[in-house]
Amino acid sequence: VNFGRMSEDEARRYFQQLIHAVDYCHSRGVYHRDLK
């Protein structure tokens, strides 16, 4: 594991995965208050 700052591309990949995961949860009827 590389500690410290991550590249912008790597951060973008993680953020896109997070957005897809939240979108999937929404499509299954799970919302933000349920994800806390």
Image (spheres, rainbow, N blue to C red):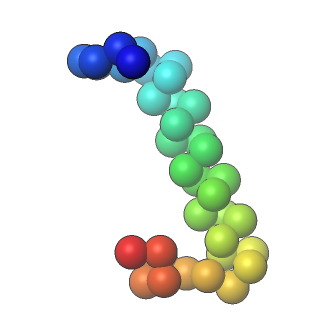
Q: Is residue 4 left or right of residue 18?
A: left
Q: Residue at x 45, y 29 (%)?
A: 11
Q: Residue at x 74, y 79 (%)?
A: 28
Q: Is residue 35 left or right of residue 28?
A: left
Q: Residue at x 28, y 18 (%)?
A: 3
Q: Residue furthest left?
A: 4
Tell me residue 1's x, y (percent). 39, 18
- Please tell me whether residue 10 is drawn above or below residue 35 in the rendered image: above
Tell me residue 13's x, y (percent). 57, 31
Tell me residue 22's x, y (percent). 59, 63
Image quadrant where residue 26 sits: bottom right
Q: Residue furthest right?
A: 27
Q: Residue at x 55, y 81 (%)?
A: 31
Tell me residue 9's x, y (percent). 52, 19
Rendered-image quadrant of the C terminus: bottom left
* Nearest the eye: 3 or 5: 3
Image quadrant where residue 6 sits: top left
- Please tell me whether residue 24 is drawn above or below residue 33 in the rendered image: above
Number of numbered tags placed on the structure image? 0
